[in-house]
Image (cartoon, rainbow, N blue to C red):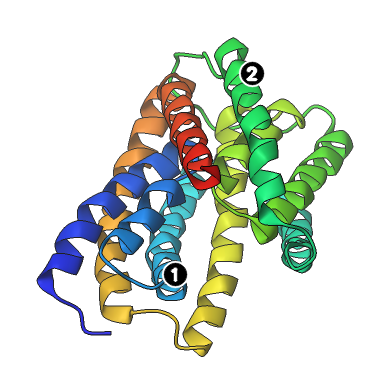
Amino acid sequence: MELTLLHFLIVCPLVFLAGFVDAVAGGGGLISLPAYMLCGLPSHLAIGTNKISSSMGTALATWRYAQSGFIEWRLAPLCVACAFCGSAGGARLALLIDESLLRALLLVVLPLTGLYVLRSQSLSQKQPAQPANQPADYGRTLRLAALAALAIGLYDGFYGPGTGTFLILLLSGLAQMPLRQANGLTKVINLTTNLAAVSVFLWHGQALLPLGLTAGCFNMAGSYLGTRSFTRQGAGIAKPIILTVLLIFFIKTVWELI
């Protein structure tokens, strides 16, 4: 596909915004993937090219959160493995079940998730984020975090949008991890699955390297500012962004069903 200046002018600013949103609250793909489709890329090329840019931004966010001490590395290997298994199972399930059924279910799940976010005390903290402490009950946290990774991996393989946001909410709510620690672990999982997806799309020639790498630089800039804001302001900045992502996702789901 021949690229023009217009492709870069449409994609790069939106991918920058997606990097900021994704670093703070997940869900950046809800902005970046439509940006690629908006400039006329076919679906597979859009998804593959988006994976390149999002992987670059997620890599930077993961490094920044690791430097800040927000990643509990003992939890990461099992959670990454569970996310991979869930994603493979979700992809197989997608071949058997109509995707519209899941979209209809999301019309109920998304408003309930938004209500949870509004009422959540852990997402209302205003103090700057500090490096995470060791979990009080490591075994319980590991089991619940792995279960959350498996469930969201299943969702990611089946449908996908908003994966990072849902994973952050499950890790902070179900596994009761501090938001900063949940966000850090989410980035490790997302980075691993993104890199695996990039290799598949590149192998099949379904990605535009010039556009993906250029947009990836913008995504990294957005991720840098997002991690900086999250590190300084903590959950105070995450809550409104999560609610905005959920609202966009809800509108997108309704539009697709109509």
Numbered disc total: 2
Q: Earlier in the sequence, mark 1 or mark 2?
A: 1
Question: Disc 1 marks which amino acid?
Answer: Ser
User: Element type at marker 2?
Assistant: helix
Label 2: few (<14), some or many (≥20) within 10 Å?
some
Q: Nearer the viewer, residue 78 or 135?
A: 78
Q: Measured from the top left, where is residue 202 in percent x and y?
A: 47, 84
- Identify the residue position indicated by label 1 in the image: 43
Look at 29% across and 68% down and name the residue there. Answer: 40
Label number found at residue 13: none
Residue 120 can be seen, yes or no: yes
- Vertical position of residue 111 compared to residue 16: above or below: above
Look at 40% across and 24% down and name the residue there. Answer: 237
Q: Nearer the viewer, mark 1 or mark 2?
A: 1
In the image, 72: left or right of 144? left
Q: Nearer the viewer, residue 78 or 21?
A: 21
